[in-house]
Image: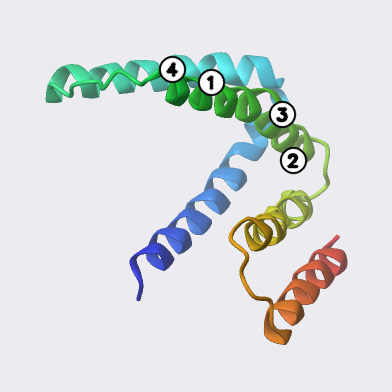
Amino acid sequence: METWLFYALMAAVFISVRDIISLDFIKRFDYIQYMVIANIIIFMGTMAYVITTGFKIQKPNLRDFGIILVRLLIVYFIIDPSIYNSIKNSDNPGYAKSVISLNTLFVFIIATFIYKSKIDLKKVAGVILMVGGSYFLV
């Protein structure tokens, strides 16, 4: 098994577990309350790791800092609240996640144009099956 596939499958399994165990919490708290609690815990854990391991933080250049900042803004102001509220307001988190998983399709399409990848009939069939599967799940 290729390394990337192992990590992708592991991420898929644990994202599913995260969403199921988070459902009760998501239904009881709003997004800002969740983010405050989560970020405090993440900060404490990260600082404990840095202190105990002696990890040296590399100073990012201005371009890298800008990319990190834009990514954080997209994640914390658009993606996470959208996922959180989608799961919170759906009858079944699987419905919300099946539509959210269409991000794979968007990455495929965007990467195809950026990297000028060739699209064959098998890939088109995969795209159609993904869209169809999400449609039937919802």
Determine whether 46 is above or below 110 in the image: above
Could you tell me residue 96's position as x and y percent?
A: 77, 49
Mark 1 — residue? Answer: 69
Three-letter amino acid code at disc 2?
Ile
Q: Residue at x 34, y 16 (%)?
A: 44
Q: CA distance from mark 4 to mark 3?
A: 23 Å
Q: Residue at x 80, y 64 (%)?
A: 134
Three-letter amino acid code at disc 3?
Ile
Count neighbours of disc 4 (C-alpha within 10 A) and say few if under 14, some if 14 to 19, many if 20 or more: few
Three-letter amino acid code at disc 4?
Leu
Mark 2 — residue? Answer: 87
Count neighbours of disc 2 (C-alpha within 10 A) and say few if under 14, some if 14 to 19, many if 20 or more: many
| Front disc: 2 or 3 | 3
Closer to the camera, 115 or 44?
115
Q: Residue at x 72, y 55 (%)?
A: 106
| Front disc: 4 or 2 | 4
Residues under numbered marks 4 and 2 in contact, where contact means CB atoms less than 8 Å apart? no
Task: For mark 2, give the secondary structure.
Answer: helix
In the rendered view, does 3 fall on the left or right side of 55?
right
Three-letter amino acid code at disc 1?
Leu
Among the 4 quarters of the image, the one containing residue 3:
bottom left
Q: CA distance from mark 4 to mark 2?
A: 36 Å
Determine whether 56 is above or below 2 in the image: above
Answer with mark 3 or mark 1, whichever residue precedes in sequence: 1
Answer with mark 4 or mark 3, whichever residue precedes in sequence: 4
Task: For mark 4, give the secondary structure.
Answer: helix
Mark 3 — residue? Answer: 78
Could you tell me residue 46's position as x and y percent?
A: 31, 22
Quadrant location of the N terminus in the rendered image: bottom left
Answer with mark 4 or mark 2, whichever residue precedes in sequence: 4
What number is the disc on residue 62? Answer: 4
